[in-house]
Amino acid sequence: MTKLSVNINKIATLRNSRGGNNPDLVKVALDCERFGAQGITVHPRPDERHIRYQDVFDLKEVIATEFNIEGNCREQKFVDLVLANKPAQVTLVPDALGQITSNHGWDTIKHQTYLQEMVALFKSEGIRVSIFVDPVVEMVEGALATGTDRIELYTEDYAKHYHTDREKAIAPYMAAAYKAKELGLGLNAGHDLDLHNLKYFAQQIPNLLEVSIGHALVCDALYYGLENTVQLYLKQLA
Ligand SMILES: CC(=O)[C@@H](O)[C@H](O)COP(=O)(O)O
Ligand SMILES: NCC(=O)COP(=O)(O)O
């Protein structure tokens, strides 16, 4: 079964817009768990525009499901944060400073030696590692050589083209997923997955262990409420 990890970045964005603690990020995380989510994802960025570094410590105290921290390991502050909190999983994402949102995966061939070092560091602390990659077979093969446990397929392109030609949109993801399966790499996916495109993705990618979903899920919660929305997403994965 594919696990749903709710990315709560956008809850932090809303909270930060007024400087207080409404909505309460920790409460929302606990409610997502209570409503059935099997994991919580955060992606702290260096400017702390949504998730603050302190949020990670606060969440780690209380989260009972799988805690996934995403970010760029080129920033020492991120590495220190992950090592101090020892989440179930760290997802390595190669974002530039000030980037609005993630827009590409790692080049696992060019940065292989560096990634090997980072993967070994996190794994030596008992943290499962996932590397964010584009749906390109060579990048999956390169990921294997880093020693990573999993890869996360960057799904923006799939989401963008789903409504025009979903067979064509899913094709590179299926090729990457089958390569990961053949190589024994675990498979996650995320970015712009939503209530329209999720079911087909999960049906076509049978070895999908986890999806992390934030932006669309939080938008849907405005209309359906958080509990219904988490349930609706879980239903797409059933
Ligand atoms: C790695 C990934 O695709 C997501 O974590 C996405 O980057 C969310 O980050 P923002 O909420 O800052 O857009
Ligand atoms: N790893 C992807 C993620 O956590 C959520 O991305 P999005 O649903 O906010 O696009």
Image: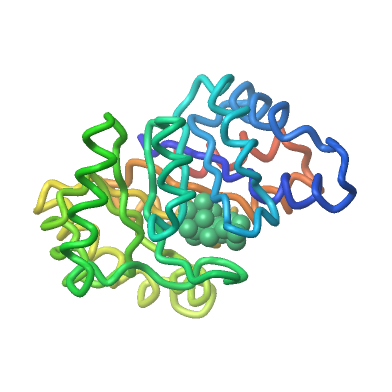
How many marks are shown on the rendered structure?
A: 0
Give the left or right position of residue 194, taking residue 50 as reference. left
Q: Residue at x 38, y 31 (%)?
A: 88
Give the left or right position of residue 176, taking residue 217 as reference. left
Q: Which percent across, then down, holds residue 12?
A: 72, 46
- Tell me where residue 166 sits by quadrant: bottom left
Give the left or right position of residue 225, taking residue 145 as reference. right
Q: In this rendering, does residue 193 appear at all? A: no
Above/below status of 5 relative to 108 = above
65 and 158: which one is in front? 65
Q: In this rendering, does residue 156 appear at all? A: yes
Q: Which percent across, then down, holds residue 178?
A: 18, 58
177 and 202: which one is in front? 177
Q: Which percent across, then down, holds residue 80?
A: 43, 42
The quadrant of the picture occupied by the C terminus is top left
Q: Residue at x 39, y 74 (%)?
A: 169
Q: Residue at x 58, y 20 (%)?
A: 62
Q: Which percent across, then down, holds residue 137?
A: 19, 70
- Tell me where residue 26 sits by quadrant: top right
Q: Residue at x 52, y 75 (%)?
A: 160
Give the left or right position of residue 117, taking residue 66 as reference. left
- Name the quadrant where ligand 1 sits: bottom right
The quadrant of the picture occupied by the N terminus is top left
Q: How is the image coloured?
A: rainbow
